[in-house]
Amino acid sequence: MTSAKDRLSRLLGSVEMARAYTLAALTATFGSFMIEQMTSATTYATIIVLLCALGVAILFVRREELSLLRLAPSSLFAFLALALASVFWTTDRSDTLVGWLWTFGFAIMAITIGHIRDTLQTVRAIGDTLRALLLVSLGLEVLSGILIDVPIAFLQIEGNLALGGPVQGIFGTRNMLGFVAVIALITFFIEWRTQSVVAPIAVPSIALAGFLALVSASPTVLVLAVAVGVATAALTIVRHTPAAHRTLVQWVLGALTLASLAVAFAFRHPIIAWMGGGSDFSIRADLWNQILDFVAIRPFQGWGWFGPWQRGEYPFTYINYLLDDQHQTALNAFFDVLLQLGIAGFLLFLILGGVALIRSWLVASVRHSVVYAWTPLVLVTLAVDSMFESFTLAGAGWFMLVLCALRAGQSRSWRENIDAANTGVIPTLRAQE
């Protein structure tokens, strides 16, 4: 007769639990604003704590399947360690500890999903989750903006759909809706190309995400769309290049990318004017200049890790006072990390995202299945969006960064060589996979 402990272990290690946990964690992550507005911050924090505890339990039950060396990227551990260490020099230890716990919690959920689901299963789960959340967003926008023509105050839905936007759905801001819609577009397209879902589901899903990205009227959506489009074209070229010439093509594309960035920077003002984002960029430029003044005071260690800016905390309140504004982030993930964790944190953040992008790009270049293109394209989205928002440092953005970094490390990492030395198996990247 099996004991209750054995039954619980089988349940936690089952495929059904893996799928249910993944969907629950993704819904809690991407639906954070709606859940918190409909309940409370305490309720949402309780949900995240329970999901983290369940994730740790699942990993413990599956411990024989895991390698400690490949549990997560070393750069992620270093970044989390520095953020926790900042409690010793922060302006508010309790708020820094709370901010770190949120960061650590979303990382735990991402690590769990990265180990219990493969890439295709992850894409399918994210696709199902975002399809549902975007449908709810559209439904509420139609209800508010067309059917009853009344704002839904507790979700901050203003009911502007009939006017062509901007709309924000259940995500709180139009920029967040645009960010989620672009990730959804990538995911739905990969689902379609891998035949994970049938065309009658894939095509309307792509249309839904594209429509909401358009009516979000987010100034960053166009930049994200162009960046993802260029990255997709470049990756397609590399994937169809013969192996003998692939390295040369990679270097040429890298040089073209650097040249394009230089040209874009040189002509940034005409480009911003053409996009109609002059005033928006001006606000950001003033904020970033002010942040650099505070970075100069503590250039190496920063002011302590908070994630999103806490109300009443220095230097955030003073920055807002000087600008006569109410910013809740630096509107740039790189400036936010530089302000909070200094140059050390900035470099670790670059390493975490940069190494993940390079690894995933190289894997997607040689493997035939298009599902491997999902990770580098999402990382490109996160990198570009980080120049205009700080989404990558908290919530869904941070979750996606950790998940993609873990996925990239599983496919191409120095840890594979150590594991190979212990098992006698030589790791390879086979083009036919």
Image (cartoon, rainbow, N blue to C red):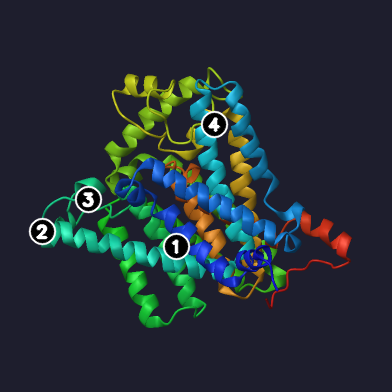
Label 2 vs 3, first from the N-terminus: 2
SS under mark 3: loop
Residue 251 shows in the view = no
Side of 273 where 111 appears, left or right: right
Badge 1 vs badge 4, beta-carbon distance below 8 Å: no
Q: State how far apart marks 2 and 3 are (Cα).
A: 12 Å
Residue 317 place in picture, x, y as percent: 37, 22
Residue at figure coordinates x 26%, y 49% from the top left: 155
Crowdedness of circle 2 by 10 Å Cα count: few (<14), some, many (20+)?
A: few
Residue 3 place in picture, x, y as percent: 68, 67
Identify which amino acid the numbered label 2 is placed on. Ile
Q: Is residue 283 above or below residue 396?
A: above
Q: Which mark is residue 148?
A: 2
Quadrant where the image shows the C terminus: bottom right
Quadrant where the image shows the N terminus: bottom right
Identify which amino acid the numbered label 3 is placed on. Ile
Badge 4 vs badge 3, beta-carbon distance below 8 Å: no
Crowdedness of circle 4 by 10 Å Cα count: few (<14), some, many (20+)?
A: many
Q: State how far apart marks 2 and 1 are (Cα).
A: 37 Å
Label 2 vs 1, first from the N-terminus: 2
* Residue underneath mark 1: 229
* Residue underneath mark 4: 97
SS under mark 1: helix
